Image (tube, rainbow, N blue to C red):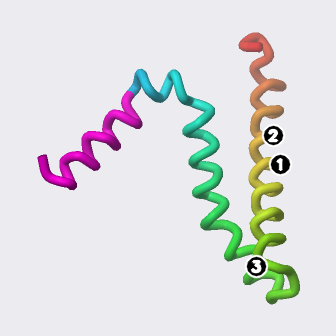
């Protein structure tokens, strides 16, 4: 088995339906961290280097957390029967 086939098989197993149901929160955390890696440099660029890199990552993480909590609360308000 080549390296590419092994990586592809591992990727397919990781994101299969049964694994997604068991490890949903883990995948959410992974996706939020990846999104934070893309968002933090934009925050750092927008501030004009007046803040440190760690502060930019923290601000981006807090923004993602706020957005996620807001989306959850909107979902709970409009469909309370699921909770």
* First to last magenta residue range: 1-16
Residue receiving disc 3: 44
Instruction: Mark 3: give few (<14), some (14-19) or many (20+) Cα within 10 Å.
Output: many
Q: Are marks 2 and 1 in contact (CB under 8 Å)?
A: yes
CA distance for labels 1 and 3: 18 Å
Looking at the image, which residue is at 76% across and 79% down?
44
Looking at the image, which residue is at 23% across and 46% down?
6
Residue 69's label in the rendered image is 2
Residue receiving disc 1: 66
Answer with mark 2 or mark 3, whichever residue precedes in sequence. Answer: 3
Looking at the image, which residue is at 76% across and 11% down?
81
Instruction: Note whether 60 is above or below 49 in the view shown.
Output: above
Of marks 1 and 3, the one in the foreground: 3
Q: Secondary structure at mark 1?
A: helix
- The quadrant of the image that shows the C terminus is top right
Q: Is residue 77 one of those drawn in magenta?
A: no
Q: Secondary structure at mark 3?
A: helix
Answer with mark 1 or mark 3, whichever residue precedes in sequence. Answer: 3
CA distance for labels 2 and 1: 5 Å
Of marks 2 and 3, the one in the foreground: 3
Instruction: Note whether 81 is above or below 16 in the view shown.
Output: above
- Left or right, 68 with reference to 11: right
Q: Secondary structure at mark 2?
A: helix
Classify residue 28 by image quadrant.
top right
Of residues 20 and 70, the one nearer the viewer is 20
What is the residue that sits farthest to the left in this orientation?
Answer: 1
């Amino acid at each position: 088995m080549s390296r590419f086939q092994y990586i592809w098989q591992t990727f397919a197993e990781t994101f299969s339906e049964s694994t997604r149901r068991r490890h949903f929160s883990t995948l959410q955390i992974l996706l939020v961290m990846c999104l934070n890696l893309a968002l933090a440099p934009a925050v750092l660029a927008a501030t004009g280097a007046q803040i440190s890199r760690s502060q930019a990552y923290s601000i981006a993480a807090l923004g993602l957390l706020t957005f996620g909590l807001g989306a959850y609360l909107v979902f709970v308000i409009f469909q309370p029967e699921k909770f």
